[in-house]
Image (tube, rainbow, N blue to C red):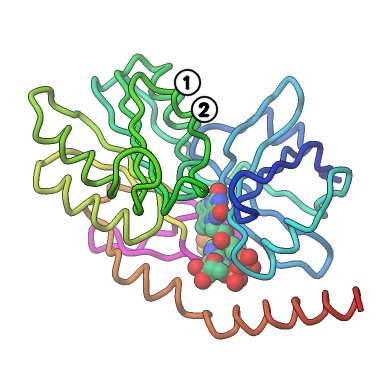
Amino acid sequence: MYEILNKEVLAQGTVVLNEISAPRIAGKAKPGQFVILKANETGERVPLTMADSDPKRGTITIIYQVVGKSTHMFADMPVGASYQDVIGPLGKATHLEKVGRVACVGGGTGVAVLHPITRGMKEAGNEVIAIIGARNKDLLILEDKMRAASHVLKVCTDDGSYGHHGFVTDVLKGYLTGPEKVDLVVGIGPVPMMKFLTKLTKEYGVKTMVSLNPIMVDGTGMCGCCRVTVGGKTQFACVDGPEFDGHTVDFDELTQRLAAYREDEAKSWARYKEECACRTR
Ligand SMILES: Cc1cc2nc3c(=O)[nH]c(=O)nc-3n(C[C@H](O)[C@H](O)[C@H](O)COP(=O)(O)OP(=O)(O)OC[C@H]3O[C@@H](n4cnc5c(N)ncnc54)[C@H](O)[C@@H]3O)c2cc1C
Ligand code: FES
């Protein structure tokens, strides 16, 4: 069983961190890889990226945004409770090599996914500029960890409550037009953010890797649920990704596919809320 050893609420009750006992996964995990978790026998399979892993302690860390039924179920689990299943590590690890100057750009919970990649890019000998953003100060996560993982950290908020007032793409543009060139951009966040970020970097001809989050079921390339179009070809994000060359991703198709079950997801969340209310009445 996969016991929760540590739990922290990172942002206004909407972003939760769990450190989970999973020695065999922790021994193999690499930056960029993910796991699929189930809370209990009847629970949904939920893909989440490993934000960290510690082979000595035998633990992995996940950081998730509480958005619907399953993530609310996860958030309700206390320290000492166990996940029924944790499968992984899944997906291809990030290709970490020395390329020169790398900009690691993260939005919202995407910063959790970006953190081990940023650290890995620095360890590989790159000069790393990290740019992170959130809608407001209270939703910003991992600022200290991202500062430690990079050489320069820039922080942005959409409402100007902290750091630069504006989007991460505004700050990135300053680097793309500046005197020193950026050799690689890694951008991870909400799909609209990755879409606009890749549009910007394409103008400046800077290679950009993104991490895609289509709906996944098995996570092993069998069901076809996670298919995305990259460079005009169908790819399965769970085995061919989740990282891809952002300039060749069909983001509009990804947006449409992510919204395919929105009505059912809303009903499922409403039912779960009602059941919780009944239990506490
Ligand atoms: C490889 C990968 C890594 C991810 N890493 C993280 C992470 O580190 N942190 C984080 O907060 N989120 C991550 N996600 C997204 C996370 O899986 C969804 O937020 C979660 O499944 C929502 O489930 P729910 O029941 O709470 O919400 P629901 O109400 O069921 O869904 C809310 C939204 O989440 C997405 N979603 C729903 N089911 C799935 C599914 N089976 N697979 C993928 N997306 C789904 C859809 O866009 C949906 O509209 C990742 C997704 C993928 C594919
Ligand atoms: S999740 Fe089934 S093929 Fe990728």
| Residue beneath the point at 45% across and 76% down | 259
How far apart, in angstroms, are the residues tagged by discs 1 and 2?
5 Å
Q: Position of residue 102 (x, y in %)?
A: 28, 28
The span shown in magenta is 214-239
Locate residue 56: give its quadrant: top right
Quarter of the figure that contains the C terminus = bottom right
The answer to whether residue 227 is above or below residue 126 is below
User: Which residue is depicted at the point 48% across and 33% down?
Assistant: 143
Residue 148: numbered disc: 1
Residue 25, can we see it?
yes
274, above or below 61, in the image: below
Foreground pick, 71 / 170: 170
The quadrant of the picture showing ligand 1 is bottom right
Count of marks overlaid on the render: 2
Q: Is residue 233 magenta?
A: yes
Residue bearing the label numbered 2: 145
Q: Residue at x 76, y 67 (%)?
A: 43
Q: Residue at x 44, y 51 (%)?
A: 136
Using residue 5 as the reference point, say whether residue 120 is left or right of it.
left
Residue at disc 2, CB closer than 8 Å to ligand 1: no
Does residue 85 show up magenta in the picture? no
Numbered circle sitting on residue 249: none
User: Mark 1: which secondary structure?
Assistant: helix
**Residues marked 1 and 2 touching at CB (< 8 Å):** yes
